[in-house]
Amino acid sequence: MMSGDGAQDGPDALLAAIAAKCGRSVEDTRSVLTRHGVGITRSLAVPKRLCLRSLRFSGEKKGGKAAGTIAFDWPEIGPGIWGITSGRNLRGKSTVLGIIRWCLTGKRSGIPAEMAEWFATVRLSFTLDDQPYEVEIADAVAVKGTLWRGVDDARRAQATFGSEDGFKAAMSDLFMMQLGLSPLVTHTVRPTGESLDQPHDWAFFAGAMSIEPNPEYLFGTVAMSALPTRMMQMFLGIPWTSANADLVAAKGRLRNQATQSRAFAKGVADRRKDRIEALGKAVAAAEAELRTLHTPAADRAALAVANQAYAELEARRRAAEAKLAAVEADVAAASEAAAHAGRLLQDFTDDRAAGMVFRALEPVCCPRCDEVFAEDRRAATRDEQTCVVCRTVEAPEQDPSEAKERLRAAADLAAGELSYQRTRLRLAREALGSVETASKEAEKVCAGIEARLAAPSRRAELEAELIGNKARLEELDAEGEASADEGDDGSVIEAALAVVEDAFKPLQESVLKEVSDLILAYAVLFGVENLEETKLSGNTTLRLVKAGVATSFGRQTAGEKARLKIAATLAIITVAERRGVGRHPGLLLIDSPGANEMVAQDYDKLVAGLAGLPAEFRHLQVLVAAVESPTIREHIPERHRKRAVGDDYLW
């Protein structure tokens, strides 16, 4: 268990507590924390005091009525309250503070863009405790120069720079190391979805030295998530603040990674679903097409059946042809018989008719020799019933009807047989035509099957495609959701956050109670009237009670917010001084405190209160940029003022 005061718990004890809380080994826990850039360190440091010693810059103003040479020289500055004053506004006071901030951070802010090429050289000397340094910008336009350490013969180049980035890096390295500061890392997500770790170094921390006329935030000049809170913790010297900051960043990083993993997994799942649907359709289409295709074995079997049917039909055709030939012969015979019977009947009929004619004839002469027959001969032949010509006895004429009926019956029978045989012929021809048609169809079937067997088939291609698609479907069905390793790491980070917060929160609450009391005292000293209670919380929210009404920092007027911010910053410096910890360098740059409609009485209290602080803190240095006024003259000695009289400019 942590002791709770934050002072006796070492890194090993803290690490063991984290491991116990998350149920992991110490080595495993250390590995996870290291993997996510978390260092379990107490982050304590002995405060060092920054004090400006001199400022010089030169150049050439361009355009306007004030064009001319720039030659600013403030040779002797030290602890205490100092004024940068002018008879009127817009005479360069804020720019002087901007140049000081530029020299201390390497970041050119507070200097109007139109003045970027006005300055040629800049020199700022300062001390950190008793160690002297000097920033020499030999070419202010190109930002080229040197950071010197020491003076005179002992002066050595601490760093050289040839760009603004190089300048910022040189100043950040110096102050982060000398003040014992650790970069604050935040994890941010860009609108594009890209996530990244954003480190904040000295340029960010230096914001704690500036008090603007209408401050929006209680600490620093940038509101970015929990950064003001961490700035406050760092400058208060709260232990484990660096570890806590690293853990918060790691938690955000893991949260974003989890969000991205879920989005990625959803995309994968959607694509997997679409792929399964597409493969399912392809499998169904291939199976449907395969059902329309004949297999070679089935075709060969069908061909055997078709060939057998064709052979049988050919046999039937040949039999039908033979039968037709036989029927045709029978028809010919019947036709001949019918013709013969008809002729017999006709001959009989003709003979009967001819006999009657010839018997009715009375020949008078021989048809051969033309001899004329005598009458007696004719009479004798009539009586004897012999032929007058040839003397042949004439048979008596019989009844012809019986013979004729017999011949007629024979003729009818032959005609009936002929009709029957002709019917047989028609039927035989029809049977032959039918079997010929069936045989031709069977031949076509055989030819079609043979053509299919001979032609290339899509079956093999479809079967291979079907096998492949089914295999891919099985793989997709077997795939599980990928589990991210961050889940286990997240439990370690959560456990570490809880343990680290338990380690520093009791001390932080005690320190914040002390800071809150001092904020009240300083704010009242600076003229914030009716203020009865102040409470600074761990998230840098400043709750107030004024005239019995609860309120907050953000609801105050611009002048009150400026005074409350100064009070809060001084309270932190005071507590850190008393406890021998903290990292605030003890320099305050206050810009135009009277520019926020602060009444003269309140302005006087603020300046008077600031002027009285150095008696309590000999190391504290306060630079106030303000319009010259009786209040300034009363509380800031003339030797502590860099002033421009009347309409003059400071540089």
Image (cartoon, grey):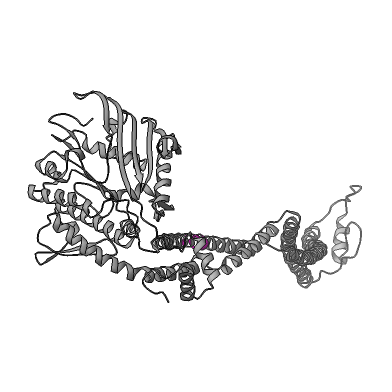
Judge by depth and name the residue closer to the eye, 487 or 323.
487
Residue 522 visible to an observer of this rendering = yes
| Magenta stretch prevailing secondary structure | helix
Q: What is the count of numbered marks?
A: 0
Q: Which residues are magenta?
A: 266-272
The reply, left or right, for residue 356 in relation to residue 80 is right
Where residue 578 appears, x then y in whole percent?
Answer: 29, 61
Dividing the picture into quarters, in which one does residue 293 lie? bottom right
The reply, left or right, for residue 402 in relation to residue 25 is right
Report the quarter where the C terminus lies.
Answer: top left
Q: Is residue 431 magenta?
A: no
Residue 484 visible to an observer of this rendering = no
Identify whether 602 is placed above or below 473.
above
Identify whether 348 is placed above or below 623.
below
Identify whether 303 is placed above or below 54.
below
Judge by depth and name the residue closer to the eye, 240 or 639.
639
User: Which residue lies at the image location 69% right of the left edge and 63% below the top edge?
Assistant: 294
Identify whether 389 is placed above or below 9.
above
Judge by depth and name the residue closer to the eye, 436 or 397.
436
The reply, left or right, for residue 204 in relation to residue 369 is left
Where residue 296 appears, x then y in whole percent?
Answer: 74, 62
Dividing the picture into quarters, in which one does residue 98 lie? top left
Report the quarter where the N terminus lies.
Answer: bottom left
User: Which residue lies at the image location 18% right of the left edge and 51% below the top edge?
Assistant: 612
Please identify the residue farthest to the front as the structure is shown: 153
Where residue 279 appears, x then y in whole percent?
Answer: 57, 61
Where residue 120 appears, x then y in whole percent?
Answer: 34, 28
Judge by depth and name the residue closer to the eye, 604 or 154.
154
User: Which residue lies at the image location 41% right of the left edge and 74% below the top edge?
Assistant: 2
User: Which residue lies at the image location 17% right of the left edge and 61% below the top edge?
Assistant: 521
